[in-house]
Amino acid sequence: MADIKAAADALRGNFSGDVLVAADPAFDACRRVHNGMIDRRPALIARCRGVGDVQAAVRLARDHQLEIAVRGGGHNVAGNAVCDGGLMIDLAGMRGVHVDPAARRARAQGGATWADYNRETQLFGLASTGGVVSTTGVAGLTLGGGLGHLMGKHGMAVDCLRGATMVTASGDVVRAGADEHPDLFWAIRGGGGNFGVAAWLDFEVAPVGPVVTGGLVAHPFAAARDVLRFYRDLTANLPDELIAFGGLLHGPDGTRLAAIAVCHCGDLESGRAATDPVKRFGSPAMDAIGPMPYSVVNTLFDPGFPRGALNYWKSNFLAALTDQAIDGIIAQFESCPSPMSALLLEHFHGAATRVAPTATAFPHRSVGYNCLIISEWMDPAATDVNVKWARDTYTAMSPHFASGRYANYLNADEVGQADAVSAAFGPNAARLREVKRKYDPDNVFHLNQNIRP
């Protein structure tokens, strides 16, 4: 057992940030992550301000045999950002974003969120693929693959990544890119936090907006079957510039709805033409599709994911969106116990699917849909019934699933399961183990979708 006081004193001697222990007033707030289901208490929290602090924290954990958790945005549903009894490396104070518009590059620190990133890049009418909830961390989402509103045109977030400054398990600071540590660069593009702490991430950015065509239409739940069949037909032939997500969700008053959310990142006239069929279909209860800033599109789902809400998610790629799969989605949503929960379909096409499955560690490059079961509620007393609904829905939908799973959506029960991790990494699992053995042979970074060396 590590001497926590001695460890804290040792770290403070070579640290520019704050070192927190349980007695410190800021400790409880800092240990909390986005998912209210996660209630863990680290022994120490190292609130880093730069790469030197990250290096000092990693070396301290190795010297004192402390388990390491790394907090970027803190959004991961499994709660990997915090541990019990170990060292939480908190990057929330490292949120800088630097943009070079002439070179079409943007650099983000490991604690930046997509709201931070988009605010800076959109000053120059530039962007890269980055999530659908603005409070999500740049690093965590990217390292796991990174789906988002621009993936049809610009690929996944990992496809926009051009390099990263990593602090490895040995405490070394290395640059991972096409010309430096290319094996590590391959692995971090989809392999999650298995290989070190991403202190800086470098992206290629492209002209986007700042005004694009986006928003959401919502139909009464009674029309769900027709809406989801229309969504299937719509997504059969989308331009690269248009991303469309569909599904079943609740309105602010708890009303069940069938919805389609879109973002077209091209010129406004093309965006109007591409989204017009969505606006004209059926008799929507709400139509909020039109020109809006790209940074606003990236906040549309934010109200549905308040900090502190209890979350239990499950997901899997679909083999196909058949009539039977649609009927299964509707039947399961009818029994949904929480007015905050949703069943979403995330469509993959375009540039994200034109990358070979082994070109990056992220292997899921087929045109199709990810089925995301979001169980979300506020009352801890309702935990059992909401978790059961998510699990039952996953079981009911399993006959329609393909083999792949999105690593970023694995929940706390699944991140240590060999079959779930294998489904997340697919044909890249063996090569990822080789890179893991090279850069983290002792599995120091194991609070993640873990690749055992």
Image (cartoon, grey):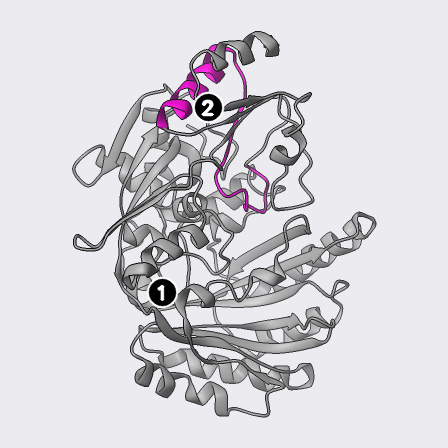
Secondary structure at numbered mark 1: loop
Could you tell me residue 356's position as x and y percent? 27, 56
Q: Residue at x 40, y 67 (%)?
A: 294
Q: With respect to residue 343, does 377 lie above or below?
A: above
In this view, the residue in front, 425 or 166, is: 166
What residue did someone put label 1 on?
150
Crowd rating for badge 2 (residues with CA inside 10 Å; few <14, some 14–19, many 20+): many
Ranked by sequence position, the earlier of labels 2 and 1 is 1
Q: Quadrant of residue 264?
A: bottom left
Could you tell me residue 318's position as x and y percent? 50, 65
Which disc is residue 416 wearing? Answer: none
Crowd rating for badge 1 (residues with CA inside 10 Å; few <14, some 14–19, many 20+): many
Could you tell me if residue 236 is visible in this image?
yes
The segment highlighted magenta reads 51-80
In this view, the residue in front, 390 or 39, is: 39
* Residue type marked 2: Val
- The C terminus - image quarter: top left
* Residue type marked 1: Leu
Which disc is residue 444 wearing? Answer: 2
Could you tell me residue 196's position as x and y percent? 39, 30
Secondary structure at numbered mark 2: loop
Could you tell me if residue 128 is visible in this image?
no
Whether the magenta-drawn stretch holds residue 358 is answered as: no
Q: Quick check: 251 left or right of 354?
A: right
- The N terminus - image quarter: top right
Q: Quick check: 279 left or right of 358?
A: right
Q: Residue at x 63, y 59 (%)?
A: 374
In this view, the residue in front, 184 or 59, is: 59
Could you tell me residue 42's position as x and y percent? 62, 25
Q: Residue at x 29, y 35 (%)?
A: 184
Whether the magenta-drawn stretch holds residue 67 is answered as: yes
Q: Quadrant of residue 388?
A: bottom right
